[in-house]
Amino acid sequence: LTPNMFQYSLLQKARTHKKHIVLPEGEDERIIKAAARLQLIDIVDLTLLGDRNAIQLKCDQIGLQLDLNKINILNPDDSIHNNDFSNTLFEARKHKGMTETTAKDLVTDVSYYGTLMILNGLADGMVSGAAHTTMHTIKPALQLIKTKPGVSVVSSVFFMCLSDRVSVMGDCAVNPNPNAAQLAEIAISSALSAEAFGIEARIAMLSYSSGNSGKGEEVEKVRKATAIVRDLLPNLKIEG
C-alpha cells in the first residue's frame, strides 16, 4: 500500500462515514490551516476549541479563507457545557480523590474538554498533540474513556508513510517497558489498528537481536511475547 493510496483510502472512508472531530488546539496556526483544508474537501464536521476572536485574528494574519460560521467553535474558558462536564468529571474521578473545585478547573483544559465532548456524545473523536505532550493529550482519555472490552493496556501506533509503503509502528509513545504479556497485547492492538486502515498485518517483533542470534532479557521477552501472540491468534503473520 503506497502512501498516496493510503491517503486516498482514508479520504474515501471519511467521506462515506462522516464524523464529528474536536480539535482542542484550535488557536494553533497549523490546526487552523488543517481545518481550512478539511472544510474545503468537506469530509468531516469540526469543533475547534479556543477563542473565536483569536482564531479569526490568526486567519486574518496568515491570509486564510476559513468560514468560521460553518465550524463549531467552543471556548472551554466560558462554555455552556462546563457545569455538565465538571459534574461528569467529578462523578468519574471522586473515588480517586478529585474534588468538585478541581473538576471545575480541569474542564477548562482543552484536553479534558475535548475528551468530555466525546464521553458525552458531542464528538466522535479528537485529534491533538500539535502543541501538547502525549501525556497531556491522552491522560484524560486514560481516566475517562478507558480501554475497550478485552484490552487491558493502552498503546499507540504511528503510521509511517515511507516512499513506497506505509508501516505501522507500535508502541512508540505510551509504555516505556512493557512485559511480555503486555507486548503481545500491544502487537495485537497494533495489528487490528493496521487492518482497520486497510493495511495487511505482517508483524515484526523487534529487540536488539534478530531471529535467534542473540541472548538476553530483552530478547527473551520479545520471543515470549511472539509465542503468546501465536497462541492467541495463530493465523496472524508474525515473526520475532
Image: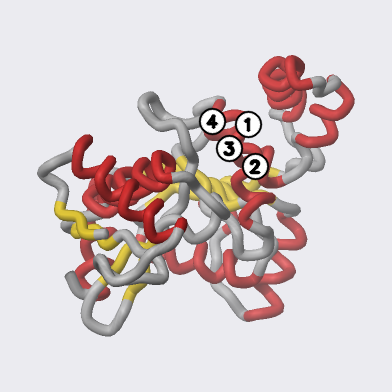
Callout 4 crowding tier (Cα within 10 Å): few <14, some 14–19, many ≥20: some
Whole-percent x and y of residue 101?
A: 89, 25
Residue appearing at x 75%, y 29% in the figure:
82
Cα separation between marks 1 and 2: 6 Å
Residue type (three-letter) at the residue carrying disc 3: Ala
SS of the residue under disc 1: helix
> Which badge, 4 or 2, comes first in the chain's sequence?
2
Callout 1 crowding tier (Cα within 10 Å): few <14, some 14–19, many ≥20: some
SS of the residue under disc 3: helix
Cα separation between marks 4 and 2: 10 Å
Whole-percent x and y of residue 28?
A: 67, 66
Mark 4 near mark 3, Cβ–Cβ under 8 Å? yes
Residue 145 circle label = 4
Q: Residue furthest right?
A: 101
Snapshot quadrant of residue 213: bottom left
SS of the residue under disc 4: loop
SS of the residue under disc 2: helix
Residue appearing at x 45%, y 38% in the figure:
124
Cα separation between marks 2 and 3: 5 Å
Mark 1 near mark 4, Cβ–Cβ under 8 Å? no
Snapshot quadrant of residue 144: top right
Mark 1 near mark 2, Cβ–Cβ under 8 Å? yes
Residue 143 circle label = 1
Cα separation between marks 1 and 4: 6 Å
Whether residue 21 is visible: no
Mark 2 near mark 3, Cβ–Cβ under 8 Å? yes
Residue that label 2 marks: 139
Mark 1 near mark 3, Cβ–Cβ under 8 Å? yes
Residue type (three-letter) at the residue carrying disc 1: Gln
Residue type (three-letter) at the residue carrying disc 4: Ile
Residue that label 3 marks: 141
